[in-house]
Image (cartoon, grey):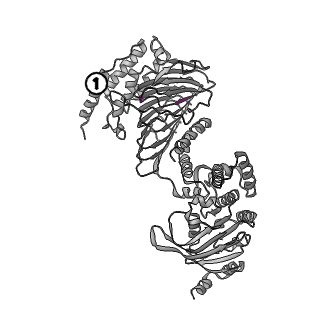
Amino acid sequence: MLEIKNLHCELEDDSEVKILKGLSLTINPGEVHAIMGPNGSGKSTLSYVLSGRDGYAVTDGSATLEGADLLAMEPEERAAAGLFLAFQYPVEIPGVGNMTFLRTAVNAQRKARGEEELSAGDFLKIIRAKAKELQIDADMLKRPVNVGFSGGEKKRNEILQMAMLEPKMCILDETDSGLDVDAMKLVSDGVNALRDAGRSFLVITHYQRLLNPIKPDVVHIMSEGRIIKTGGPELALEVEENGYADLLAEAAA
Amino acid sequence: MMPRAKLKAQKVEAAEALLGALTLPTGGAWITKARTAAAARVASMGLPSKRDEYWRYTDPRRLTAPAAEAAKLHAADDEAPLFDGFDRLKLVFVDGVFDAQASDTLALSGVEICTLADAARTDLHWARDLFGALEARGQAPVERSLASLNTAHATQGLLIRVTATPPKPIALVYRRSEAAADAMVHHVIRVESGAEATLLENGPMAARFNQVTEIEIAASATLHPIRAQGRDHDRAGITHLFAKLGARAQQKSFNLSANGALIRNEAVIWLDGAEGSAHIAGATVGDGAFHHDDTVFVTHGAPRCESRQVFKKVLRRGAVGVFQGKILVDQIAQLTDGYQISQSLLLDEDAQFLAKPELEIYADDVKCSHGSTSGEIDQNQLFYLRARGVPEDRAKMLLVLAFLAEALEEIADPAYADDLRARLESWFKRRS
């Protein structure tokens, strides 16, 4: 599904700042991978480079989604190709209704893929059902995108977008940050409901706690812009227990 | 800096030259009196000059020149005329001249309407207490001599008295025919106590136009004027709205301007009775050779009134937006609630926004706030939309419409706002 090879990137405005330094990663269809790592290891940058945010220059390596060169695409083309990033800090957009935003996004992607656009009625039916599962009420759908939403509401709104857009490759960037226990359950239930053989996930997180309800197939430890260790779910438990220090020392040795 | 006396002499000289070339229209006693007084005001004030503080950001020369410059006629065959879908009393002007044949009959329940031309022939008319009177009052503290020029020489316009709430809006449609027509239109509207009406205006009016609308909204009456100024690029014009609101009277006015080489819209509002409410809003979109000026003066002359000014401008490729907005709170106007915001979204580095917000407050228990900002499209918001699959052009349009939304929300009836929003959307689509 997602194949990243030897990815190098630096800040566009400051080529002295190298962030990714030869990152490689392969995620097969249906797999859930987690990336853990200390602050500043480049986890969020990886999500931005994959989704096409300005400000980063890729100097070497490649990233493909089902064989297509992600790095050559505009952000909207990546989205239409099936990539989805759940933002660590979902953006507030005053003046644009949540519903309008989602309908525009869903139909833009369908159009880009040559599919028929959803009618207003069909869209409404689908979004109401999915919003209900995430306990997002009608009022939140009507309000401007993320404006006045609590931290938990913003993250649930991200998952709702994911559910509506039905991407193939979902990247969750610290989706657990700022969530209380109840919101965590809603979010992880929402993610688990989307798991299937044709959809893959990359879960970026600091903590083990999100990896209990969302059980990953593979866990990677990232440091200094590279994957330094890969293992099963037990690797996450090890981090929770002992912190990163041992792993970092091991990698340095 | 030119000495004040010399500037004044030049302005007066320019006014005398202009007035000398014009002949005061003939009419009944009441209107002749109003016109003569207005001509005298023009002669004593002189014509506006770029050196006037009030005209610092907008050069009035095209408005004061002896003749109108030609403006290419714009045939908007790519969209239906605005407000066409609404049941309305449609009254058509062509190059600023009332066209009875193209218009509906001047009859609507709850409303008395006659043309200025017809009223001018009568010896006595209800409008005599208002015609030129609100305009004259609006000459202090800032002079607006082009409005007086209009009172003196306009022969076209409508006198509308709303006595009860009419079943549909009164819609004035301004069409063009001649490339270099010079229009002067003067409307007077009085909304009687308790009545409520909507006034729709749309169209480019003329190659050059000077419009005055004098409005009196009596106690507990409501008038919502909604205007869109057409799409013709080369035209130049000035409009003046003078509105006087009685106790508990309400007004929500909105103006949409797209294109136009030089447009200045002045609004002078007096809240004369307690608990009146006046909202003045505008959305402006300019691309290229475009200069748009909103000049607003709201006077709180009675206690417990509310006023809101909301102006939004989207500008690119050298387009210039101007906002001069003032809230004046008299000593008697305790518990005033005044708000003013003017914002521009500059789509590139060539666009320009000039703002002069002012507050002058003489009462001690009031709530007044004002703000003015200039910004560009938020890159985080743009990326968020694109990351969800919305193409860049469409994402930008959504953000631009979101920026303008606050002004459109001031429109009392959302059905009109929807129609205007669709126009704005088409305007951006044609440019992406």
Left or right for A63, reference A16? right
Q: Residue at x 74, y 66 (%)?
A: A195
Residue nearer the viewer, A196 or B229: A196
User: What is the magenta range?
Assistant: B198-209
Residue identified by numbered label 1: B17
What is the x, y in percent for residue B80?
A: 57, 33
Residue nearer the viewer, B143 or A200: A200
What is the x, y in percent for residue A223?
A: 58, 78
Q: Does residue A91 appear anywhere in the picture?
A: no
Left or right for B300, reference B84? left
Q: Residue at x 32, y 22 (%)?
A: B19
Q: Is residue B205 magenta?
A: yes
What is the x, y in percent for residue B116?
A: 47, 18
Mark 1 residue element: helix
Quadrant (top left/top right/bottom left/bottom right) for the N terminus of chain A? bottom right
Left or right for B32, reference B379? left
Chain ID at mark 1: B
Q: Amino acid at mark 1?
A: Ala
What is the x, y in percent for residue B31?
A: 42, 16
Quadrant in the picture for residue B167: top right
Residue nearer the viewer, B179 or A49: B179
Q: Is residue A210 magenta?
A: no
Q: Is residue B29 above or below residue B81?
A: above
Q: Residue at x 32, y 37 (%)?
A: B50
Quadrant in the picture for residue B20: top left
Quadrant (top left/top right/bottom left/bottom right) for the C terminus of chain A? bottom right
